[in-house]
Amino acid sequence: MNGNHDEGPVDPVAQEDACPNCGERESDELVWLDDERVECQRCRTVYRPGAHASEDGQTDASSA
Ligand SMILES: [Zn+2]
């Protein structure tokens, strides 16, 4: 009884790298155009994955 799961991506990228338009996470569908930009083969959106941003915990979102 193991065949009732969602058919998720075989090789998903990080959540930050997913397509912002359609949410695609299958790495096969996300083609790197250059060092910074990825093109989603599903909806043809070109975007910059945010995984390479500063991940040092410099979140400064507590100033209103
Ligand atoms: Zn997409």
Image (spheres, rainbow, N blue to C red):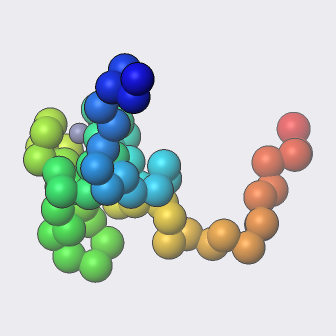
- Is residue 61 rendered to the left or right of residue 4? right
Q: For the point 17% across and 51% down, which residue is it?
A: 29
- Is residue 50 rendered to the left or right of residue 62? left
* Residue 45 x, y percent position in the rendering: 19, 44
The residue at the far front in this view is: 1
Q: For the point 88% across and 45% down, which residue is it?
A: 63
Q: Nearer the viewer, residue 56 or 7?
A: 7
Q: Nearer the viewer, residue 6 or 13?
A: 6
Q: On the rendered image, what quadrant is the N terminus found in?
A: top left
- As drawn, 36 above or below 31: below
- Is residue 33 rendered to the left or right of residue 17? left
* Residue 8 x, y percent position in the rendering: 33, 37
* Residue 30 x, y percent position in the rendering: 21, 55
Give the mark count: 0
* Residue 46 x, y percent position in the rendering: 21, 52
Q: For the point 55% across and 69% down, which residue is it?
A: 53
Q: Is residue 5 visible?
A: no
The residue at the far right in this view is: 63
- As drawn, 21 above or below 9: above
Q: For the point 87% across and 46% down, which residue is it?
A: 62
Q: On the rendered image, what quadrant is the C terminus found in?
A: top right
Q: Nearer the viewer, residue 60 or 11?
A: 11
Q: Is residue 29 visible?
A: yes
Q: Which quadrant does ligand 1 occupy?
A: top left
